[in-house]
Amino acid sequence: MSEQALAIARDALAGTQAWLVGGAVRDRLLGRPTADLDLAVAGDVEAAARTLARAARAAVFPLSQDFGAWRVVARGGAWHADVSPLIGETIEQDLAKRDFTLNAIAEPLDGGEPVDPTGGCADLAARRLRMVSPQAFDADPLRVLRLPRLACELDLRPEPATLAAGADHAAGLADVAAERVFGELKRIVASPDPLTGIELMERVGAVDAVLPELAALAGVEQSAYHHLDVYGHTLAVLAEAVALERDPFAVFGEEQGAAVAALLAEPLADELTRGDALRWGALFHDVAKPRTRAVGLAGRVSFWHHDSEGAELSRAILARLHASERLRAHVAALTRHHLRLGFLVRERPLPPRVEYRYLKACEPVEVDVTLLSVADRLATRGRRSEEAIARHLQLARELLGPALAWREHGPPRPLVRGDELADALGIARGPRLGTLLAELEEAAYAGEIASREEAIAYARTLPEPDAAGA
């Protein structure tokens, strides 16, 4: 927490009955940095919020018309404070209505011992996640998702009674606003231990409630080249994506590993990094397998078009969760192209034109989807897996450099403008011209042409569409 912000709040609200509450106290006790203050005030909440805003020279606005909360945001967004009225007549009554005991601790803003009526400090010391009361989930079903989120973010162990109560209320998640559900989900997926978070979601029934498409992967058997069903494989790919994000050097070496680490740390959308988005790609890359599964001759299992259908399905899921268009498009592209690199393994060494087509098709996720394909391959350990993994990783390393260069510099600059080419060849502006320009770009990438004159001369050698079709 910003100690400066806390000091400002103490000075500004001196003489006001106010308490630091909830996650701000919890994180303070854990020694975790946070830029958020949660304040409970007995009395005029708006007046307290405006007083704090004046003292901090910060912005202030109502946060919730229903609950009377206000938010104060420091200049530059360095910290913010949510100022809320007491729920009940005393701070003890307020704390009794909160979700988990470790969030039901209050510190008097003007000093004094913590107010801890439910034993939150002891639970925090024991790394135990416990509901404040059996009615905790009645007040807000979103707490069913908050349970696994807190557990995987803070390395906590939910007590059995709390897990059971959460499971009893999982159906209520259907009535929670999508934005709130996504807010918890994205923190679970981005947490230090998303696998534990998803396991706990399973145990309380939250996967079925908010990600039924993911739950539907369970029990979907695959070919002999896989050792897990689709659900188990999906979680294994997520685990490999997490491992790759934590230590890209193990797969890509020093130079490429540093570039991968920098890329995955970049912000993307919805307060998520590219590394976080890669995890969403891992979760959804095979999401269409149940609807595309087929069994052919000799019992051979196939999933034709699960990549393209999965792209549309992943986009629909994220739209339902009210994720941003940028995240939807990014994850859909990862899903659509996650098989491409594997299809190229037998073509090594790749001709420059094949390399170009891969990068052009996968843009703008040419690097990200290469990483996803690595996680996917590492998690696939069925028949002849070691040999397949070795070949796949070698190709990924060979393609990663060009992919990083493509992302930084883009495709080769056109050697000739479209209007110049049309005039030189005496053709109309239209689809034919676009086809020629695309062919010239590919030829330039392959090093077959290097000047405007060579580009025009090469274009003259290309057959007309009808001739090519013949």
Image (cartoon, helix red, strand yellow):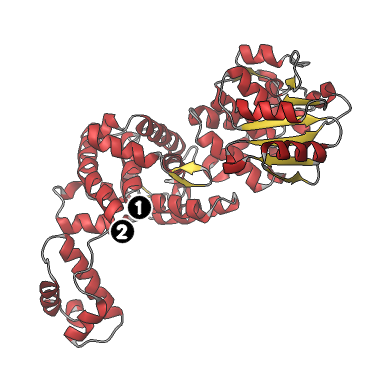
Disc 2 versus disc 1: distance between alpha carbons? 8 Å
Q: Residue 337 bears which disc, if any?
A: 1
In the displayed structure, 450 sits above or below 421; it is: above
The disc labelled 1 sits on which kind of residue?
His
**Residue closer to the observer: 10 or 349:** 10
Reading the image, the residue beneath label 2 is 361
Figure quadrant of residue 70: top right
Q: Answer whether labels 2 and 1 touch (C-beta < 8 Å).
A: yes
Quarter of the image that includes the C terminus: bottom left
Q: How many marks?
A: 2
SS assignment at label 1? helix
Quarter of the image that includes the N terminus: top right
Figure quadrant of residue 304: bottom left
Sequence-wise, the earlier of marks 2 and 1 is 1
The disc labelled 2 sits on which kind of residue?
Ala
Residue 17 position, x and y percent, is: 83, 26
